[in-house]
């Protein structure tokens, strides 16, 4: 009997940043991931604050601001925090 597919791996497989990953790589990423649900208007990160998380938008929209100016909108499959992980 086959094990049921891991929903986290299934979800990752559909996102642009991970389409080239192998099954083994997707399982590795999924084991180190957690799902975070943010309320509308919640602040996910702040400019200039050192972080240690990499985020992927699964659904909805996140607004990116520099000061009070909107500079981008992130949607499904878009990422944020990748530079803080590299630092």
Image (cartoon, rainbow, N blue to C red):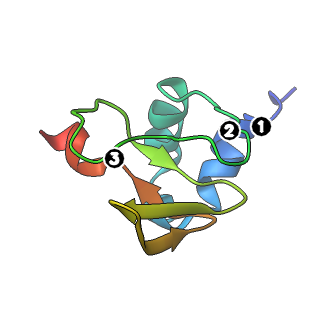
Q: Position of residue 55 (x, y in %)?
A: 47, 45
Q: Report how far apart the C-alphas of labels 1 and 2 lie in the structure.
A: 26 Å
66 displayed left or right of 68? left
1 or 2: tag closer to the N-terminus: 1
33 displayed left or right of 42? left
Q: Position of residue 8 (x, y in %)?
A: 67, 38
- Is 53 in front, or is 13? 53
Choose mark 1 or mark 2, whichever is in front.
Answer: 2
Kind of element beneath mark 2: loop
Kind of element beneath mark 1: loop
Q: Position of residue 72 (x, y in %)?
A: 45, 74
Q: Report how far apart the C-alphas of labels 1 and 3 lie in the structure.
A: 28 Å
3 or 2: tag closer to the N-terminus: 2
Residue under label 1: 5
> Are there few (<14), some (14-19), or many (20+) residues within 10 Å of tag 3?
some
1 or 3: tag closer to the N-terminus: 1
Disc marking residue 38: 2
Q: Are marks 1 and 3 in contact (CB under 8 Å)?
A: no
Residue that appears at 53% across and 63% down: 63
Residue under label 3: 81
């Amino acid at each position: 009997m086959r094990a049921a597919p891991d929903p986290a791996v299934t979800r990752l497989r559909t996102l642009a940043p991970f389409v080239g990953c192998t099954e083994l790589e997707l399982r590795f990423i999924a084991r180190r991931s957690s799902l975070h649900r943010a309320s509308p208007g919640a602040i996910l990160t702040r400019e200039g604050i050192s972080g240690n998380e990499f985020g992927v938008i699964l659904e909805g929209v996140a607004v990116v601001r520099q000061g009070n100016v909107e500079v981008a909108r992130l949607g499904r499959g878009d990422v944020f925090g990748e530079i803080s992980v590299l630092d």
